[in-house]
Amino acid sequence: MRKGISLVLLLSFLFMVAVPAYGNDMNGIQRFNDVPTGHWADETVHRARQLGITDGLGDNQFGLGMTISRAEYVALLVKLMQWPVNAGGSSSFDDNNDPNAWYYNTLETAGQQGMLTAGGQFRPTDNITREEMAVLAVSALGFRDLGNQLASSGTAFGDVTQNQGYIALASDLGLMSGIGNGQFAPRQTATREQAVSMMVRLYDQLQNQI
């Protein structure tokens, strides 16, 4: 019942989402030096590079196996959604008060787009968890209210006790899946390739709604 309800509500909102437009030519994409051929994320990581979602850490390094911070993840979503990064303005978070920080304007842009709730601590340099990835991705799509409405509807994952609506939507949309045995591992930190793979799935879902 939960899944049926969430999908029905989701369809009522889905066509309100702006769909970013990217090129699809995979020819001539430079391979990252640290992503070996045959790795499970090889194709996805390089497709994300082709789409302009990420260009790695510099020096042609992707950062395979490294964790990703909350600010870095938000930056990927802002880039994916093609939101113009707005400079200036007052801080929306107690711990985002350095205008010279690389993520300052990115976080403010995400807040202006309704993806983040202003106030309190954002913890930009903390490693992002799988639960937080689901919450932010669903919020980027404009489904924060829906995620909250489904908060008590439950999920298919036995280890999810918070943000159930967001995780249910992320699962129903095919953005994220469990780790097996009915577990989602909401507190587990994510790697850069896991985050980028989710971005590519999000991109594909948006394109499918055209």
Image (tube, rainbow, N blue to C red):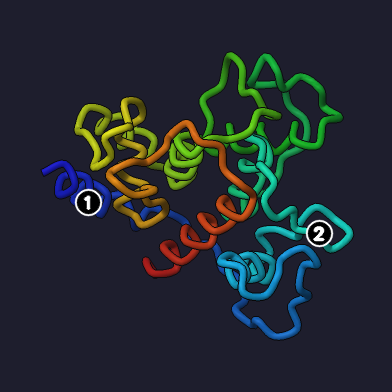
User: What residue is rendered at 61% in x and 55% in y?
Assistant: 193
The image quadrant where one finds the C terminus is bottom left
Q: Residue under label 2, please give it.
A: 61
In the rendered view, tell whether residue 137 sits above or below residue 70.
Answer: below
Q: Amino acid at mark 2?
A: Gln
Q: Quadrant of residue 106?
A: top right
Q: Position of residue 37 (x, y in %)?
A: 67, 75
- The answer to whether residue 167 is left or right of residue 8 is right
Q: Residue under label 1, please give it.
A: 7
User: What residue is rendered at 77% in x and 67% in y?
Assistant: 32
User: Label 1: how many residues lie within 10 Å, few (<14), some (14-19) or many (20+)?
Assistant: some
Q: Position of residue 198 (x, y in %)?
A: 51, 55
On residue 173, which mark appears? none
Q: Amino acid at mark 1?
A: Leu
In the rendered view, tell whether residue 183 sits above or below residue 39.
Answer: above
Counting residues from the N terminus, which is met first, the one under dot 1 or under dot 2? Answer: 1
